[in-house]
Amino acid sequence: FEFFAIAAVLYYLIAKGVILLARLLAWRLFRY
């Protein structure tokens, strides 16, 4: 159960990071 919880948290953090990165890139692209 602990391993599953850690994996879920890691997946959530990675997803959040990818979304943030994509948003940052889109924002920078649309600025120009």
Image (tube, rainbow, N blue to C red):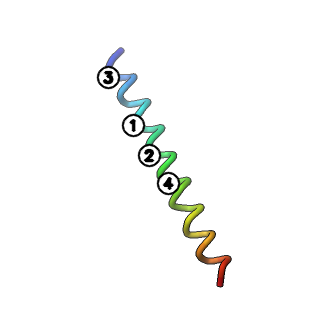
Residue contact between numbered discs 4 and 2, judged by CB atoms under 8 Å = yes
Q: Nearer the viewer, residue 3 or 17?
A: 17
Q: Residues within 10 Å of mark 4 (few under 14, many from 20)?
A: few
| Residue 27 percent coordinates (x, y) | 62, 70
What residue is shown with label 4? 18
Label 3 sits on a secondary structure element that is helix
Real-space Cα separation, disc 3 to disc 2, in angstroms: 16 Å
Residue contact between numbered discs 2 and 1, judged by CB atoms under 8 Å = yes
Query: Does residue 2 appear left or right of residue 14 in this picture?
Result: left
- Mark closest to the chain's N terminus, 3 or 4: 3
Real-space Cα separation, disc 2 to disc 1, in angstroms: 6 Å
Label 2 sits on a secondary structure element that is helix
- Mark closest to the chain's N terminus, 1 or 3: 3
Label 1 sits on a secondary structure element that is helix
- Mark closest to the chain's N terminus, 3 or 2: 3
In the displayed image of the protein, which residue is found farthest to the top?
1
In the displayed image of the protein, which residue is found farthest to the front?
31
Q: Quadrant of residue 23?
A: bottom right
Q: Residues within 10 Å of mark 1 (few under 14, many from 20)?
A: few
What residue is shown with label 1? 10
| Residue 17 percent coordinates (x, y) | 47, 51
Real-space Cα separation, disc 4 to disc 2, in angstroms: 6 Å
What residue is shown with label 2? 14
